[in-house]
Image: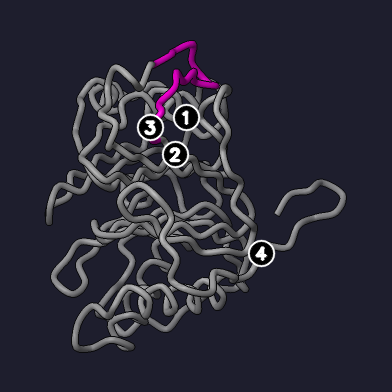
């Protein structure tokens, strides 16, 4: 199972603390050794770092861990390959342009018997089900809204319908952002936490690292973190309901109507999706 990490904030914030724990899962505290990547939105631009090497051993990951890039929206992924060989072109997150903005997408799961009809406007470069799904999503949005980006509620409703359709093929946890909103779809497992005043001390689950957010924030700061599994062991994370799509803006979930989608079917013997 791959792992996802997203951050959405009301002020530009660095993700160094959370990334320290997250990258350890790429070969040190967990078995996700098939590549990793992270994307930072900066206004209309994106800094994208990709490496097919395990994140725990990657010099690029070490650079990111020590480089306090501040962003309102971040998406990261560490890969355990199910479809597609271990190569740079199959490494998440993926980036494309739609409506004059960059979009970033990362997926955790496995889609079976999934062969969307792609017109050519958006085509996968690699050979993963994940990149196919991203192209399918953007193509569907472009066809549905040919005049440009719709209001946020209409965009959320369209993504919910796509999550239901594509999620019928298997496990479809994903993070998607255009730099304005961060969408999180839970097919089987995702959790989130909103950090805001009064801030506390947090300790990572995967590394013996502690940070006192009172020393690094102002009373007006708010940060939402979304992860496959909680990154800290002394904070209360909210488990998302399997079969739900949430949107985050300014460091908190924002309601746009119905959130229900489709949950991945689980094996009753193992509990696996």
Q: Which residue is mark 1?
A: 26
In the rendering, at what x and y percent does residue 200 appear? 44, 22
Residue numbers of the magenta segment: 196-211
**In the rendered image, the vertical position of residue 31 relative to residue 81, given as above or below:** above
From the viewer's side, name the closer residue of 238 and 50. 238
Q: Is residue 49 left or right of residue 165?
A: left
CB within 8 Å, label 3 to label 4: no
Please report the residue visible at 20 percent of the width from the left and 48 percent of the height from the top. 41
Label 2 environment density (alpha carbons within 10 Å; few <14, some 14–19, many ≥20): many
Q: Where, quadrant-wise, is the C terminus in this rendering? A: bottom right
Q: Tell me which corner region of the image, top left, top right, bottom left or bottom right, holds residue 196.
A: top left
What is the CA distance from the residue labelled 3 to the residue labelled 4?
33 Å
Let me know if residue 141 is in the magenta part. no
Q: Which residue is mark 2?
A: 78
Label 4 environment density (alpha carbons within 10 Å; few <14, some 14–19, many ≥20): many
Q: Which residue is most to the right?
A: 269
- Secondary structure under tag 4 reads loop
In the rendering, at what x and y percent does residue 168 appear? 62, 73
Please report the residue visible at 56 percent of the width from the left and 57 percent of the height from the top. 186
What is the CA distance from the residue labelled 2 to the residue labelled 1?
6 Å
Earlier residue among tags 2 and 1: 1
Let me know if residue 201 is in the magenta part. yes
Q: Which residue is mark 4?
A: 263
């Amino acid at each position: 199972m791959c792992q996802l990490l997203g951050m959405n904030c009301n002020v530009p914030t660095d993700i160094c603390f959370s990334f320290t724990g997250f990258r350890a899962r790429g070969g040190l505290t967990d078995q996700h050794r098939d590549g990793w990547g992270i994307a930072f939105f900066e206004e209309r631009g994106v800094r994208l770092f990709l490496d097919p090497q395990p994140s725990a051993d990657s010099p690029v990951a070490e650079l990111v861990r020590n480089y306090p890039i501040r962003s309102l929206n971040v998406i990261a992924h560490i890969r355990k390959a199910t479809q597609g060989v271990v190569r740079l072109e199959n490494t998440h997150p993926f980036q494309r342009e739609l409506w004059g903005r960059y979009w970033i997408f990362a997926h955790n799961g496995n889609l079976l018997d999934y062969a969307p009809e792609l017109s050519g406007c958006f085509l996968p470069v690699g050979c993963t089900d994940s990149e196919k799904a991203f192209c399918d999503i953007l193509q569907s949005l472009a066809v549905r809204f040919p005049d440009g980006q719709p209001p946020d509620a209409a965009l959320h409703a369209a993504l919910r319908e796509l999550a239901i359709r594509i999620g019928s093929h298997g496990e479809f946890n994903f993070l998607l952002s255009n730099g304005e909103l961060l969408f999180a779809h839970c097919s089987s497992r995702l959790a989130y936490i909103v950090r805001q005043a009064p801030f506390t001390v947090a300790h990572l689950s995967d590394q013996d690292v502690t940070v006192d957010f009172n020393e690094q924030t102002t009373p007006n700061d708010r940060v939402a973190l979304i992860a496959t599994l909680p990154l800290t062991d002394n904070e209360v994370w909210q488990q998302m309901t399997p079969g739900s799509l949430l949107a985050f803006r300014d460091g908190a979930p924002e309601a746009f109507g119905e959130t229900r989608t489709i949950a991945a079917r689980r094996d009753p013997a193992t509990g696996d999706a």
